Image (cartoon, rainbow, N blue to C red):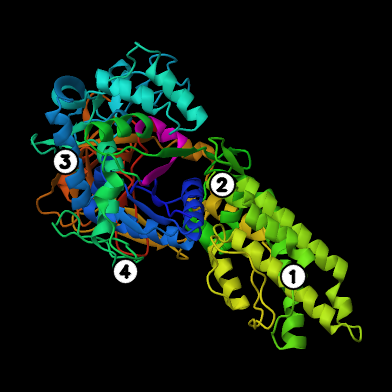
Amino acid sequence: MTTRKILVTSALPYANGSIHLGHLVEYIQTDIWVRFQKMQGNETHYVCADDTHGTPIMLRAEKEGITPEQLIARVWQEHYDDFSEFHVDFDHYGSTNSNETRESAEAIYRTLRDKNLIEVRSIEQYYDPVKNMFLPDRFIKGECPKCSAKDQYGDNCEVCGAAYAPTELIQPYSAVSGATPELRNSDHYFFKLSADSCQQFLRNWTRSGTLQTEAANKMQEWLGIEGENKLSDWDISRDAPYFGFEIPDAPGKYFYVWLDAPVGYMGSFKQLCNSRIETARVFPAQLSGETTSCCAKDRGSKIDFDEYWKQDSTTELYHFIGKDILYFHALFWPAMLEHAGFRTPTKLFAHGFLTVNGEKMSKSRGTFITARSYIDHIKNTEYLRYYYAAKLNGTMEDLDLSLDDFVAKVNSDLIGKYVNIASRCAGFIAKRFDGRLGNTDAAASAEFQAAFTGGEIARCYENRDFSRALREIMRLADVANQYIAEKKPWELAKQEGKDAELLEVCSTALTLFRDLTRYLKPVLPKLAAQVEAFLNIPPMIWNEEWAALSSGHVINDYQHLATRLDPKLIEAMVDANKESLAPAAEQKATHSEQRHAAHQQNVTNTEVAQTEKDFEPFISIEDFSKVDLRVARIVNAEQVEGAAKLLQLTLDIGEGKTRNVFAGIKSAYDPEQLKGRLTVMVANLAPRKMKFGLSEGMVLAASGSEPGLFILSPDDGAQPGMRIK
């Protein structure tokens, strides 16, 4: 059989948040397919990376008071650890913030520029005068021009689904600072996707079998009919300040994150090619000029990068992605590769979204579950791998994680059908026959041998129809259990002169168990390794002749392989996710006492009064309604001469004038960091004459038993003057 050379990628997770169960659908799907290919003997390389550039990364790092490089290094480790726990076995896991990705992005850009496929145009866009930055569409909010829904993003409405330009928003505001944005002009760089060469190439490529049928049909909608030029040129640049790669011949202009993100596939693979040395969780020194492997594994001989990426490559390239990013992967990416002189993907495999209990994942219901939360509560991550595999069929259909069904399926299939085979028979081999197997019942194993040689399960894996593969595997498990039920080894063990028959029955059952494990190995790699150790056999592969476990083969003592999934673990996980979002007063405090800081009206000129006490007695809603809490923008912040702990804040609460407030937060904040931020203030507190001037309100901050003060900030979209109630 000819060995295939295959390069596989999953979409790059963004380095701005945790991996959750929705993300894991894709990485588990990809990992199962890759493991199957490797069991087939195909030379398969699986690479991925964190997607690390863009405005959200820059702003989050700024908010945390760290550099973007520090942020993405921390998130990379979190992502890598989570993937490892779910047995997602990358050959290399890198970062788009690498020299290899930068070099590839620059090379593609220069080639496209030299072919006159890059055009510079002046465009008008919104600018935040407080943060001194141009705003991406998703960082502009306002009223939808179609349905008048409030607080909608600058590119589409989440209420009515309308798409529009940011300039069409009614009463737009910056989601970063809350300021009213200004329209300003800036030169941007465009990839000419509307060029005839791009249009014609994409018409042919999207119809060539590279896409699933439903994806290909969607592309035709976006491309339009022959002669209809529906594609717009693609803006590939962003203005400083921006965390990313600067465009080589355009100082102050940066590659848009969606340009260098797919190029990250090339960068990560190039790192694998450059180094096959095992490096345990080493993160590269970002942008330092050092070329290091993030997580590369020594799996064999040198790999030729060009063999996999040159235009006439005979290797195979597959991208596993979510259907929400088809537009980028099926239009921009292949057009860019084709015209830059590289090969295009062999196929794109798009999957659907995950729902939980039939609904979109919800924080309020506790079903927005992170990978780490699952690990902490359920422990066994292969249960989720199995359930996802049982749902995935190679199409773009959404799949549902029904938590009740999850428990039932794991306990029924994995424990009741599969593991039960070994647990019912292994003990007899150990106790009665010193762990030595006997002959196998040829008739009983014939169906398993036929299933292996017939290749139906293998075809299902190849076509990513994992649900069908598992149905067939569980059918065979039923056959094995029926054989055991008919032969009743527990009764044979009690009868004189039945040892030979008992040995054959149990040896046959363990051969059938071995076969089931081989079929399940891409889905349950850790459990398969435990079974291989128990059966005392080398790692199982797919491209070999079928043979029963031989007579006289010695197995090891049976160790418990898996336990039933307790529904209470699921309940605890859901409850924990609900608790993490409950108001602080409804949660158990980390410490038994809470620290309350009064930094504004009750301060002296020498210190901030802080008291430590239990929660105050309940108040009525009427009492609470007397406190007028307002969103305030910090227009200015400065030191107060002669005050050890005070800063003077100038606040805008939408009154048409500003207010002056003294706050005891000097130890926690640099005044420059506060300018432009939104916070919360008590607007109806009586003004108080102080040594340093008149204080016209109080800003709210939190503190605990540990050092530190933290002023409160409202969520994105809040505007000065909004009342908190």
The residue at which mark 3 appears reads as 107
If you read the primary sequence from the N terminus, does the residue marked by circle 3 or circle 2 appear first?
3
Please check the rendered image and state whether residue 210 is part of the magenta-colored stretch, yes or no.
no
The residue at which mark 1 appears reads as 509
Tell me which corner region of the image, top left, top right, bottom left or bottom right, holds residue 364.
Answer: top right
Q: Range of the magenta residues?
A: 315-328
Left or right: where 467 falls relative to 696: right
Q: Nearer the viewer, residue 356 or 657?
A: 356
Residues packed near mark 3 inside 10 Å, few (<14), some (14 to 19) or many (20 plus): some
Query: What SS does tag 4 mark?
Result: loop
The residue at which mark 2 appears reads as 367
The answer to whether any part of residue 717 appears in the image is no
If you read the primary sequence from the N terminus, does the residue marked by circle 2 or circle 1 appear first?
2
What's the distance in space between the residues labelled 3 and 1, CA to CA? Answer: 58 Å
| Residue type of the residue flagged with mark 3 | Ala
Left or right: where 193 falls relative to 115: right
